[in-house]
Image (cartoon, rainbow, N blue to C red):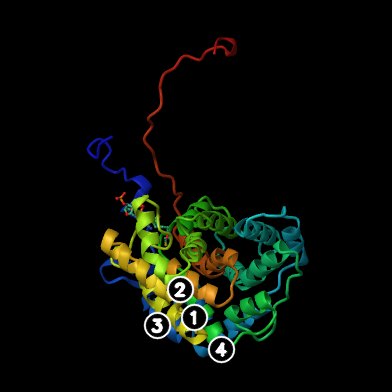
Amino acid sequence: MSATTYPNYSPGLEGIVAGITKISKITVETSRLEYRGYNVHDLAEKGSFEETAFLLLRGHLPSQEELDTFKATLEAEREVPPQVIEALRQCAPGTHPMDMLKVGYATLAGYDADYAEDALDHGANIRKAIRIVAKAPRIVTAAYHIANGREPIAPKAGLSTAANFLYMLHGKEEDAFTVKVMDASLTLYAEHTFNASTFACRVTVATLSDIYSGIVSGIGTLKGPLHGGANEEAMRMLLEVDTPEKAEDWIRTALANKSKIMGFGHREYKVGDSRAIYLTQVAKEIGRRKGNTRWGDIADIMEKVMLEEKSIYPNVDFPAAYAYYLLDIPIELYTPIFVMARVSGWSSHAIEQLAHNRLIRPTCIYEGPEGLDYPEIGSR
Ligand SMILES: CC(C)(COP(=O)(O)OP(=O)(O)OC[C@H]1O[C@@H](n2cnc3c(N)ncnc32)[C@H](O)[C@@H]1OP(=O)(O)O)[C@@H](O)C(=O)NCCC(=O)NCCS
């Protein structure tokens, strides 16, 4: 197969422009990520996940009054109908947490007050999106507790998205630093142009299916280790490496065996992922505060060898893995946390797609047999 025969063919759609967006921009040369024109570092450092979600959904940073109203709406929408919790209980033992989230959102869809509204109804989609974002921590933590044979913990009034998640997970309010780290990580995970799960979400709604179906497509796509699942795999890898002394040998052996190192590499970023740069500093600060620099030390060695041997940088999932570990977050929740944040990006893309919709339907190259005669079943 040659580029001359099929000039538009790019495996994995690499380098193909598949749409226009005003939601976020990656500048590869400077490793800069902007949400609607704002550097994600500023949003993570100075803002809050709620501000980010508002910015993504509404297109501008909120005034104080708009932010207060938005937070109040999120708070009023945090609880889910009991049937959603019941649906999570019906999942088979051992169901993957990401599959439980699909069940949660698929069940929630029919209970949304705007469920019956037309897919193109912008107002209804904004209301749905706010509910989708508001309820994510409740669904994620309920799925986790149910999977582990415990009763879910209800949301608490007056807490932010990050604080409520930690409260519903640990059953107690966390300190301001822990909440800030979680909040910043949600901002960093909230949005990332035409990544695989966002694209899947856009493909789904472009058929004029509903926004909940787009979210379920997004969750299914994010689950894989080449995408969102990498943060969990990265932590399992760090645990296997175990100590800084073993790190260099471990990674050199893995590279010699042609293994993919989880939490490294990126389709877009070739000189570093801006989110990883920011989150590495945060993860190391958590380590210092907790008196545990082991994971940061292992990470330094692995990053050095990856650069020397492959010229590949860590992506956001690498520091996120040990940041969450240091915050006592169970590993199987790392990708669900990604969902909790990314529902804001997916919803914004769904709404943008529907505002200028065109069915997304690429073509393909057929390489199988052609023109065969149909044989009767007895002669096959
Ligand atoms: C993210 C990812 C899928 C991007 O993949 P891609 O754009 O398709 O790039 P490729 O997989 O074709 O990689 C290009 C080259 O870099 C190497 N490479 C890329 N990521 C690597 C990694 N994490 N570990 C080791 N080698 C890697 C590939 O082996 C390939 O080398 P080769 O040309 O010698 O065969 C890939 O880097 C990866 O699998 N990373 C690990 C999973 C991960 O962290 N995912 C989260 C992304 S945010």
Give me the disc on residue 53: none
How far apart in space, not on screen, are marks 2 and 1 (Cα)? 8 Å
Q: Nearer the viewer, residue 7 or 96?
A: 96
The quadrant of the image that shows the C terminus is: top right
| Quadrant position of ligand 1 | bottom left
| Residue receiving disc 2 | 295
Q: Earlier in the sequence, mark 4 or mark 2?
A: 4
How far apart in space, not on screen, are marks 1 and 4 (Cα)? 19 Å
The residue at 53%/56% (across/down) is 223
| Residue receiving disc 3 | 42
Q: Could you tell me which secondary element the residue under label 4 belongs to?
A: helix
Circle 1 packing at 10 Å, graded few (<14), some (14-19), many (20+), is some
Circle 3 packing at 10 Å, graded few (<14), some (14-19), many (20+), is few
| Residue receiving disc 4 | 176
Of labels 4 and 2, the one closer to you: 2
Above or below 202: residue 235: below
Circle 4 packing at 10 Å, graded few (<14), some (14-19), many (20+), is few
